[in-house]
Image (cartoon, helix red, strand yellow):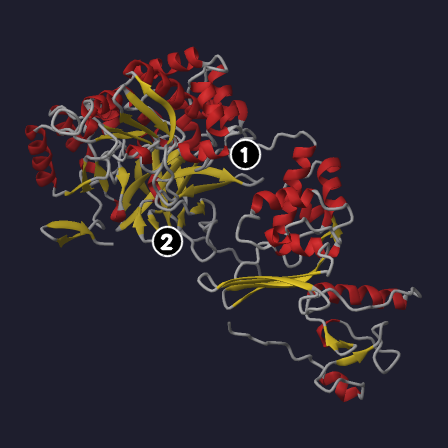
Amino acid sequence: METLTITAVEWVMACYADDVPANGGACVKLRDEQIAVYNFSRRGEWYATQNLCPHKQQMVLSRGMIGSTGEMCEPKVACPFHKNTFSLLSGQCLTDNELSIKTFPVMVDNGKVFIGFA
Amino acid sequence: MLVISAGIRPRDELAKLCGLQTGTRGGIVVDEKMQTSDGCIFAIGECALYEGVIYGLVAPGYEMADIVVSQLTNGSKLFHGYDMSTKLKLIGVDVASFGDAFITEPDCRTIVFEDTHKGVYKRINLSTDGRQLLGGILIGDADAYNMLLQTVNNKIVLPPNPEDLILGSRGGSESEGAGVMSLPDDALICSCEAVNKATICSTVSDLGITSVDGIKKCTKAATGCGGCVPLVKDLIAGTMKANGQYIKNVLCEHFDYSRQELFDLVKINVLKNYDLVLDYFGKGDGCEVCKPAVASILSSLWNDVIVKQDTIQDSNDRFLANIQKGGTYSVVPRIPGGEITPDKLIVLGQVAKRYGLYTKITGGQRIDMFGAHLNDLPAIWEELIDAGFESGHAYGKALRTVKSCVGSTWCRFGLHDSVSFAIEIEERYKGIRAPHKIKGGVSGCIRECAEAKSKDFGIIATEKGWNLYVCGNGGSKPQHAQLLAADIDKETLVKYLDRFLMFYIKTAEPLSRTATWLNKMDGGLSYLKNVVVNDSLGLGHQLEQEMQSLVDTYHCEWKEVVDDPALRKRFTHFINAPEEKDPTVQFEPMRDQVKAKW
């Protein structure tokens, strides 16, 4: 018998869309976590990841430059400390196989940015 | 010298079980057809013993495979041994042997170079008439391996001074590049995959493939051990040059232009923001390489307030402060020429105490304050600006400082007032952005206490006026500045500096200091002198005008932020809790001050 499991996602308001600079990131404090929210305005897309860079454990990813890479234009963020890059889709570090970051689903509704917690 | 003899034991257990003939020290005996003692069974690779030798490299393994295929398809290819020349790393030491490495006199002549200080030993064996290279050994420095192997295999006639082949790094990459183009077309470049020079060159010329990855895909060269990659790179560059193609350094995957080309395109099309530049001349969505490069070009052309395009700025420019361990920032107000009044010193002390900052004097003759929270930066700068300070641009690829020595005002040796001149120059060029940071120095006499000769531009007083030196830098590869003009007056010097700096800004590659830019310049210092001093390109007036327009549009970027509440809002750690600081930032005491806990 086919079954379908839906995990309930709780959408928590993080900030206003206007607070996040165009084509860049900003950090929000949500439920004991520091989360980096990225407004990829060039692509009309929003992303969110942990703010902590796993390389030297610094809370700075939200301050990094975003961009894309490869033929598939995979969106990425570069940590301002040592320029390690991370995929905004999968969280995988593109410059060091051993590292990865947590990603969160993002939804923007009526000018407000919501982060999804499973 | 420690000699290590190491080898592999052939896996011949299966052969022994089948009753095939094996060697006394192991290995499955094969003939030139790769047949074992049973005509229906072949053996290839490291298990096969041919005329008492096991061939432990990949290339002979492929050759043996080819022979078996030939034999099975009624061909007649036979094995006759294989060139075991190879380059390896053994316990961190580069070693190589090629051709006949062990032939001795009187059958040959040898040249040996031994440097026990650096741990280098090189030996080459020449034919008795000195015209051919027969083989050799390299230990400690095997950079010359590729060329030496080609010389042996292609029987290239040796130059009259064959010792040059192994003497030090004089035969470095430059002559290696020239050397590879002079090889015959059938010279084997990649021995693992048997790819010759002609195949690689025609792939570049006829198919337009100009990357090593492309050559790998089309010819399979460099896909084996990878040892031929330097030769392949040189061949690509050499072939392109021979075809008159301009090899340019493109910015990144998003722009197919060099920095100089993009600079001109942005200027001609009057583009003032990154997205437009990307739309017009780039592809994709940009990255951490092209964003700061374009940001620098935009700043050098239009001198707009950089915080208005904050998300394209590099790590330090983003918040107009150098990011430090722990995520705090440092604050460096400008102190032109290193001169400061007691009152201003007091302000710096008070600000540092109020915000708990660590203070230190920099090599640039100014004061740096560390440990500032992102949230506190606008308030700190507000106080500094009120006291008459301006941004020191310590965070930018921009003019940093113009150091000075005491000079004629106080020093008994000073010929001229070096401090006043240093202040004038620093005030003129402050705020200007460039491909990399720019540092200057002014010394009042030949004793050179300002260390001007290690600066991008250095000015030294003479009896008759000032000498201008350019393109020096410190860092990991220090280089002294060279004399551009001697005994000139201040007005002439500033004119030459305007032209020099603008020429650098327009033509250098991204993140190149002036020293690197000069080192790569065709014609070197003579050409630079011609352009700047003799105005050989007729650009002098234009360069001066462009520089003047930057000088005229100077603004203190911290003042811009402090005076604009919308810009101040960006300097917070949590945008949804702007009053809160980053709780993970921690300090611990050190010598009456603090340091980051990280």
Which residue lies at the image location 26% right of the left edge and 22% below the top edge? B425
Q: Position of residue B575 (x, y in %)?
A: 26, 37
- Residue B84 is marked as none
Per the image, the residue denoted by label 1 is: B249
Horizontally, is B73 left or right of B511 in the view?
Answer: right
Horizontally, is B536 left or right of B187 in the view?
Answer: left
* Total tally of numbered discs in the picture: 2
Vertical placement of residue B423 versus B18, above or below: above
The image quarter in which residue B210 lies:
top right
CA separation in Å, label 2 and label 1: 30 Å
Q: Position of residue B317 (x, y in %)?
A: 32, 33
Amino acid of disc 2: His
The 10 Å Cα crowd at callout 2, few under 14, some 14 to 19, many 20 or more, is some
The residue closer to the viewer here, B475 or B27, is B475
Q: Position of residue B126 (x, y in %)?
A: 69, 60
Instruction: Please tell me whether mark 2 or mark 1 is closer to you in this view.
Output: 1
Per the image, the residue denoted by label 2 is: A55
Which residue lies at the image location 30% right of the left edge and 41% below the top edge? A27
Vertical placement of residue B569 versus A76, above or below: above
The image quarter in which residue A37 lies:
top left
The 10 Å Cα crowd at callout 1, few under 14, some 14 to 19, many 20 or more, is few
Q: Is residue B86 visible?
A: no
